Every structure is written in C-alpha cells, then in structure tokens.
Amino acid sequence: MRKVPQPLALLMCLCAALLWPAAGSGQSAKDTTAVQNVISSLPLNQLKGISLYNANTEVTSTVPLGKFESSSTSFMLATPPPPPKGKSRKLPRFGVQFTSGTLGFGGQAATAVLHRANVRVGFNYFTYNFPHFGKDGATYTGSLNLRSFEAEFDYYLLWGIHISPGGLLYNGNKVDATALIPNGNTFTLGGTQYRAQGNITGTGDLPLNRAAPMVKLGFGNLLPRSRRHFTYNFDIGAVFQEAPKIAVNLAGTACNTTTNQCFATTSSTVQADIALEEAKINKDLKFFRYYPIISFGFGWKF
C-alpha cells in the first residue's frame, strides 16, 4: 500500500471514522474493507489529540475526539472527563453557651448536623423563695423550683432566623408552699367559712409533667457557618404541658362558723370543702398548660 503523508493520513482517519456507519450500511464490503485498511495502517500514537479550527466560532480545541481499539480497529467517541467536584464545606463540630430565661439559668451545647440545621441540648436551674405573705387569715410562704433538661432541633429559615421544635426531656419545675393558720383566725374552704381551733398547718404542691414538647422561634446561631467564634441566641416559644393541679393538705381542727361544729381537717366534711377549693384554684391555673419561654444566650464556637 502507498504510504500516506502524516497530516493527510490524520484527516483521512477522521473522515473514515465519521463515515463508518454509512460504510457499514450503504456501501459494499469492499469499500468497508478499504476504510478498515486505511485506519489500520495509521500509527495509533498519532491519534492522541488533534487541533481543529471552527470557522464560525474561531475557537481551537485540542480535546481528543476519539480512540481506536487495536484489536478490532473500531472507533469510539471520547467523552470529556467530568469537572472535578468542589470540596464540601466542613460543618462546625461543637459550641457551648450560657443561657438565662423563664426556664432558669443554664447551659447548652450544640453540634451541626446539616448545613442549615443544628441539634442543641441543655439544662436549666433556678430557685426562688417567696417572702411570707398573709391572705384570708393564713400566712403563706413558698418556693419556685425550676429544674429541666431540654433537646431541640434548630432549622435555619433565613439569615439567623430559626424554628426549633423539641421538648423538655425532664421537667422538674414545681411550686412548693406552706400555710399557717393561727388559732382563732377564720378562713374559707370551698365557700364554707371555718375558724381555726388551735394552729392549723398546711402544704400545697404544684407539680408539672415530667416531660413535655415545646417549640421555639429565635434569632442567632450557636454554630455560625463563618470564622466567627463568639455567638449569641435569642428564643421565644412555649412548653405544651398539662394544666398543673394543686394538692392541698391541712393538719389541725377547724370549726364551722355557721354551725359551730368542729371537725378534724382529715374528716370527710373538711376534705370535701378542700376538694372544692382545689378545683377552683386548678381552674385559675389552666393557662399554665402553655408555659412561656423567653431566653437569651451567648457562647463560643470551637
């Protein structure tokens, strides 16, 4: 076979590759064999790449257009390699903050789980002792005890605005109270007026659910997606719990001021009036089934 100049051979190779399907379907077997012989006679190392000129766009390209398999001299169009994927942005690992609010003073820790979401856990603690005060012939004192452990999922909607569904996994919030009714003082239970014969002492407990769901809406991020380390967070929301129910216990002797009959406070007559008084108080406490949350915190991202 006559030796073909190298530039012309490359051009013939390209034409042969592009016309290969037509040669296989519409041309004779002799023409097809001739095309195969032309391709086979070319050195494969010349097919690594070729520069093309496009008259319309005036752009040159050196992308390999195809490759040959020496065993069958078949032509395959080469697919350009996909662009390298960019490195994924690392999520912040850990952050802590100090908080203050209607659940008490406490601390929180958070970790990022998605680009726009964190998981927070924290605890709250606070105790407040009420001063002595008198009402309806009795002297009262008590304490407010806030104890809770919380967990929530912060999903960031826009900028630093986030919605945080979660719950109090442990709700130890409660109010404890004591009462003293001095001898001779009058007081009312369930609409019935009594007079203390000797001192009467009493206790009142106001427990809440041990666990309760909650939801918050806030601004700020304990784990900002930037180089900033100092953080802040503000939240408002509510804890959804059952309405609290007070339990009243009295010890002593009480006399009905209308009939002048005296009863031990453990008697069925006085206990029935205590139940009426508890129902009245519990009705007034129904709004506490939505315990309000207002909190502010500042912390550090590590």
Image (cartoon, helix red, strand yellow):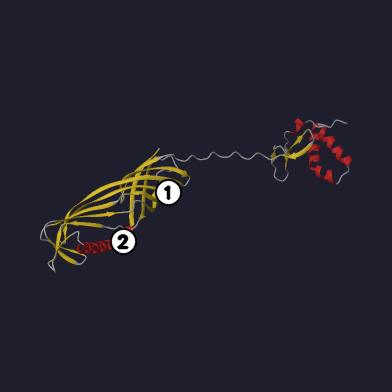
Instruction: Name the one closer to the observer, 65 or 126.
Output: 126
Horizontal side, residue 112 vs residue 168: left or right: right
Name the spot of residue 57 as percent of width and height, x first.
70, 45
Q: Quadrant of residue 21?
A: top right
Q: Which residue is mark 2?
A: 286
Q: Residue at x 18, y 67 (%)?
A: 192
Q: Identify the amino acid type marked 1.
A: Asp
Check disc 1 and report its element: helix, strand or loop: strand
Check disc 2 and report its element: helix, strand or loop: helix
Q: Identify the amino acid type marked 2.
A: Lys
Name the spot of residue 243 as percent of width and height, x first.
32, 58
Q: Quadrant of residue 183?
A: bottom left
User: Mark 1 and mark 2: span between their CA atoms?
Assistant: 29 Å
Residue 168 numbered tag = none
Kindly give the residue lying farthest to the front in the view shown.
Answer: 267
Q: Quadrant of the C terminus?
A: top left
Is the residue marked by circle 1 packed among few (<14), some (14-19), or many (20+) residues within 10 Å? Answer: many
Q: Quadrant of residue 52?
A: top right
Kindly give the residue lying farthest to the bottom in the view shown.
Answer: 258
Q: Which residue is mark 1?
A: 154
Name the spot of residue 234 as percent of width and height, x first.
36, 49
